[in-house]
Structures are given as C-alpha cells and as structure tokens.
Image (cartoon, grey):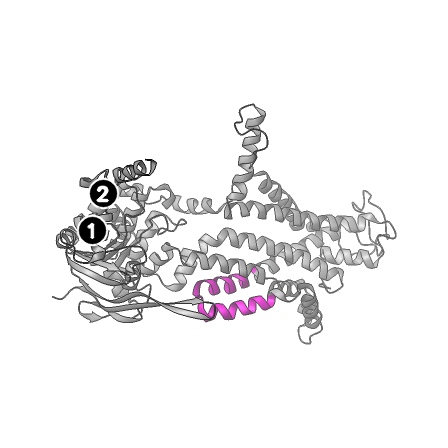
C-alpha cells in the first residue's frame, strides 16, 4: 500500500567520550516499522530505550547512523525538504518548553501556515489560525491569538502544539510522550482530541509513550522497545493480553491495575509485621 | 497592535529604585551632552583670562589656557557619549556575530570563533588599545579620520567584544537545545530565521546588558586613552579634559573646577549605566530580585511581630 511512513533498518550510535577513551552507545539498533494513514502505532519503552531518538530521526532533527526513512515508498534525503516537513510533523513532550515564551500563540500556528502555504493572504492565514485553534477545542479561537504561552495551562499549551503540527496539513504526526508532562486529569482529554483529529483527518500517528494502558487504548499496533531494539510487536490487545517477551511482561506488571489495588501495600505491611515480630 | 506592545512589555525591566536612579542619572547626562553645547560659549575659544575660579561669567571657571570649563564640559560629555555609543555598539555587533553564531551552529565553527574570542580575551586590553591607537594614528592616508573620536571608538569596539561574546555564546548554546527551537525547525523555519526570530528575542535582555556594559567600557577606555595622550586629538571628550588638566598641573595650582567636573561626570555616567545594568540583570536572573525582596518582607513581618521564623532567619 502506498502513502505510508516507513523506517527501515534504522540504527543510531552515539559516541560517548570519556576523557581519551570513547565508547559507542547503540541508541537505536535495526528498527523497522510502518505507520499507515488512519492508524496509530504505539512505541512503548522505558526512558533511554531509544524511542525519542526514533522520533527525532523521523522529524529529521537527528541523522541516523544507517537506515532510511521512507515516505510513500520513496527514501527521503537526510536533510528535510519542505515537502517532507509539510507531511510529517511532530508534537513534543514538554508543552512548557516547546512554545517560545517570547511569541504569541498566533505566531506559533501562523508560521507553519505561512511557510508551507505562501499563497495564503494575511486574512486567510488569520482565519485558518482561528479555525485550527477551535479544532483543538480552544474556543473561541480569536481569544487565544494574542495570548502568550505562559498565560496558558499545560493542557492548553499542548493543544496549541497539536494545532501547530496540524497547520501545514500533515499526514503523519509523531507524538513524543504528548501527555507525560500533563496533569493526570487532562491526559485523556488530550489523547481523545488526538484520536478524534486522527479519525477526522485520516492521520497516521506514531504515539510514543511509556504507558501501556494508554498505548492499548489509543493504538492499533504496539511496538515494545528495549535497549534500542524492538523486542515485541503486534496488535495492541494481543501484546497486552498475551505478552511474549520477558520485558513486556515486566512492563505490564509494573503498570497500575485496578484488580491488584492495594496488593503492594499489603505486601509491604506483611513484611513490616514480619520484621517487627 | 496589542501583540506588539505585549512583546515590548515582555522585554522591559520591572520598575525599581535602581532602574529609576540609573535612568535619571544617564538621562540627565545625555540631555546635558546633547543640548548644552548649543548654549555654551565656544569651547575652543582661548581668549578668556586663564585659571579663573567659577563666576557668573564662567560657570565653572576657566583653564590655564583660558578655555571655558563649562563649555568644554558640555562638548566633552557629547564627545564621550559619542565614543561610548559607537564603541559599545560595534562591540555588541561583534559579540553577537561571534557569540551567537558560535553557540548556535557549534562544531568546528564554534571552535574557530571561540579560539579568536579567547585570544582577544587574554590579550591585556589597554596595552593592545594603546598599540593599535598609536599605530593607526600615525598611519598614512587616513587624514583627519586618524585623529577622530570615531576611530578611537572603533578601536575600543574591536578590542572589547570578547567577554560579551562568551556570555552570549553560553546562552545561545542553552537556547538552541530548547524544544521550541526544535519545534521551529520541524515547522520548517530556516536556520537564520530560527536565530533571529526564535532565539534572538530571548537574548535581548542579555544583549542590552552587554551593550550597556560595552558603552561603559568604551567611555572609560576612551578616558584612559585620552589621559595617556592617545585619545582623539581633534575633538573634546571628558578624557581629553582630564589630560589637559593633568598637563596643566590643575591639582598643583588648586584649580579644582578644572578636573573635578569631568572626573565626576565620568564616575556618574558609570554609576548610572551600572544601575540600569543591575535592573536588566534582574530580568535575566529573577533570583536577584526575589531573594532580597523575600528578605525584606520577612524583616518587615518580624518587625510587626508577625514573623514565624524568629530573628536570624533572613534569606
């Protein structure tokens, strides 16, 4: 099937210098997967497993040591072209850092519009910015135009970041832990928004997270990453309900589970009681 | 547009006593330097009686050669401010080019630019300025320019940017790894636009502080050069006045009106610019403002008997 974003045999090594000696860290080792339109692929793994490096390679902020990023079956150049940028966008992890404190909200959404659609008039850009803000449920959009990032809450900022990613008319969005910096109470709202937009636009989403629960909920396919390689992949329910790899099982056990509520607390109490006796 | 004002407000320092005092001092001196020369007598007219103390005719007396000190002071202030402005601006431009480009692009460009910066940083400033000034002023073919204050200002500028460049580089290196810079690149912004639109505005307080520091260094540097007799010879500055006073043995002949006013003015200008710089530092580093403020509030609360931390717990 054409029209997919694919990474093939991706490797990324970092050279760690320690005085005169240097060691090589294999941050990403031989990773391949495909993100298709209308589908969400979740990349799950612990900190340092290389998932953010993959996001940065796809966003062309980092060059892979070897391997390729293919768009619609064609290899893409190392340096991003305007066309690639228009089609592949990214939502960053930290909404407090990903918006420039100096600029207004409208600047953040206006710029990608102007870069990728230079034919639009000032008036048309304005209208489009308002429309995008309202699409991410910041209503009325015109009330947010002149505000600055520090006046907005974390959830609102992340919505702005999502609107910015949508502005060029992207077909693929890499969401690098888009809710890990947000309050628990608004995480689901932001994820639902992403899912709604995905359905409406037919986006292909690469959802990077360390949270198995949301990965299962919001994605069609799950890839589990451990120390730079993908150790398990499959349909979301399959991976969660029937984990094969040791690491996936561990991850699943570490996740909060309502059925086991209080189990750990009881265990600790038992041990303390045992120790006191 | 509301947008514009918000951007400007974001950059302005918070009002404080320091800022107010600094602005008043620098404002008055600038006003004096800009306006007074139009109303004073000719500062180059030596037809007056020499070495007269202040009087109604000569507000600040006269020099040994019969120049009116007040007129010279007005012209000298203007000359010094001009040197400060040109010297400070050229130092700032060089610091921006070297510091921000090195910090943003990194790699071998960073190495090369920082090598140049470090060399400039360790060469002792005043001797280098003296050598360059002496050399250039004796160079053929420069004509009047060789004796002008513009040239002295430019020499001070090209020898005084290294410290600022190091500061700007450090901050630019920190800013380039921010996510909003990465986000701007993902959005498709070009390298130069990222530097000038995304990074530079966040450096403005720092650049302003460096500019004021540069102006101060140029004013003082010029005064030092002129005092040593290496300053501009065809214009009057506060430094050349001090040089005249020194060669004319103003101290020995107790002509305080000759050397105190220019010395005082240089000191005041330095103080005022420093005060403004402190206020700008408080935007760059809010801790500088918050810590003394917290200590003040605590002290006040203790005085009113509302303190909870007891006596010696000031921050």
Tell me, yes or no, if residue B109 can be seen here. Answer: yes
Name the magenta segment's main secondary structure.
Answer: helix
Reply yes or no: does residue B119 show up in magenta. yes
Give the quarter of the image for residue A38. bottom left
* Observer-nearest of A266 and A126: A266
Chain under callout 2: A
Which residue has dot 1 on it?
A215
Residue B121 shown in magenta = no
Q: Is residue A199 left or right of residue A87?
A: left
Between disc 1 and disc 2, the foreground one is 1
Q: Is residue B13 above or below residue A236?
A: above
Residue range in magenta is: B92-120
Percent across and percent down for residue B71 are 75, 51
In the rendered structure, the residue with mark 1 lies on which chain?
A: A
Q: Residue furthest front?
A: A277
Which residue is at 43% across, 44% downward? B5
Tell me if mark 1 has few (under 14), some (14-19) or many (20+) residues whose alpha carbon lies within 10 angstroms of its own: many
Furthest-bottom residue in view?
Answer: B140
Q: Which residue is mark 2?
A: A189
Q: Is residue A116 above or below residue B113?
A: above
């Amino acid at each position: 099937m054409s029209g997919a974003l694919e990474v093939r045999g991706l490797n990324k090594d970092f050279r760690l210098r320690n005085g005169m000696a240097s060691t090589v860290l294999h941050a990403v080792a031989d990773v391949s997967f495909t993100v298709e339109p209308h589908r969400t692929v979740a990349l799950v793994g612990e900190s340092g497993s290389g998932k953010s490096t993959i996001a940065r390679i796809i966003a062309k902020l980092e060059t892979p040591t070897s391997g390729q990023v293919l768009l619609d079956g064609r290899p893409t150049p190392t340096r991003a072209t305007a066309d690639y940028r228009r089609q592949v966008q990214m939502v960053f992890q930290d909404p407090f850092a990903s918006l420039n404190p100096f600029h207004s909200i409208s600047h953040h959404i206006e710029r990608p519009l102007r870069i990728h659609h230079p034919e639009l008039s000032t008036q048309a850009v304005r209208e489009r910015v308002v429309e995008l803000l309202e699409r991410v449920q910041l209503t009325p959009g015109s009330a947010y135009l002149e505000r600055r990032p520090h006046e907005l809450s974390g959830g609102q900022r992340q919505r702005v970041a999502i609107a910015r990613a949508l502005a060029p008319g992207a077909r693929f969005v890499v969401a690098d832990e888009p809710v890990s910096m947000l309050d628990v109470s608004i995480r689901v709202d932001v994820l639902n928004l992403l899912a709604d937009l995905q359905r409406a636009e037919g986006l292909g989403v690469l959802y990077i997270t360390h949270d198995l629960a949301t990965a299962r909920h919001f994605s069609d396919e799950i890839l589990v990453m451990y120390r730079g390689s993908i150790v398990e992949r499959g349909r979301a329910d399959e991976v969660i309900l029937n984990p094969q790899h040791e690491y996936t099982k561990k991850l699943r056990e570490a996740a909060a589970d309502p059925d086991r509520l209080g189990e750990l607390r009881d265990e600790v109490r038992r041990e303390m009681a045992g120790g006191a006796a | 547009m509301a947008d514009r004002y918000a951007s400007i407000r974001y950059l302005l320092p918070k009002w404080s006593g320091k800022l107010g005092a600094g602005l008043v001092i620098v404002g008055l001196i600038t006003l004096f330097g800009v306006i007074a020369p139009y109303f004073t007598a000719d500062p180059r007219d030596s037809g007056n009686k020499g070495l007269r103390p202040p009087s109604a005719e000569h507000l600040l007396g006269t020099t040994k050669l019969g120049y009116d000190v007040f007129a010279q002071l007005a012209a000298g202030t203007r000359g010094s401010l001009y040197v400060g402005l040109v010297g400070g601006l050229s130092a700032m431009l060089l610091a921006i080019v070297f510091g921000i480009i090195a910090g943003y692009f990194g790699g071998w460009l960073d190495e090369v630019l920082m090598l140049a910066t470090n060399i400039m940083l360790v060469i002792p400033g005043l001797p280098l300025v003296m050598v360059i000034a002496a050399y250039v002023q004796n160079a053929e073919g420069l004509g009047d320019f060789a004796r002008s204050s513009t040239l002295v200002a430019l020499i001070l500028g090209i020898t005084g940017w290294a410290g600022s460049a190091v500061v700007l580089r450090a901050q630019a290196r920190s800013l380039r790894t921010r996510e909003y810079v990465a986000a701007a690149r993902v959005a498709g912004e070009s390298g130069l636009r990222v530097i000038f639109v995304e990074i530079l505005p966040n450096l403005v307080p720092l650049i302003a502080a460096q500019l004021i520091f540069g102006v101060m260094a140029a004013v003082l540097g010029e005064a030092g050069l002129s005092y040593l007799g290496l300053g501009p010879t065809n214009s009057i500055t506060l430094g050349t006045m001090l040089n005249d006073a020194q060669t004319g043995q103003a101290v020995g002949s107790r002509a305080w009106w000759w050397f105190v006013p220019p010395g005082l003015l240089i000191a005041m200008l330095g103080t005022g610019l420093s005060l403004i710089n402190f206020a700008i530092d408080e935007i760059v580093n809010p801790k500088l403002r918050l810590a003394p403020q917290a200590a003040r509030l605590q002290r006040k609360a203790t005085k009113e008997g509302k303190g909870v931390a007891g006596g010696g717990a000031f921050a």
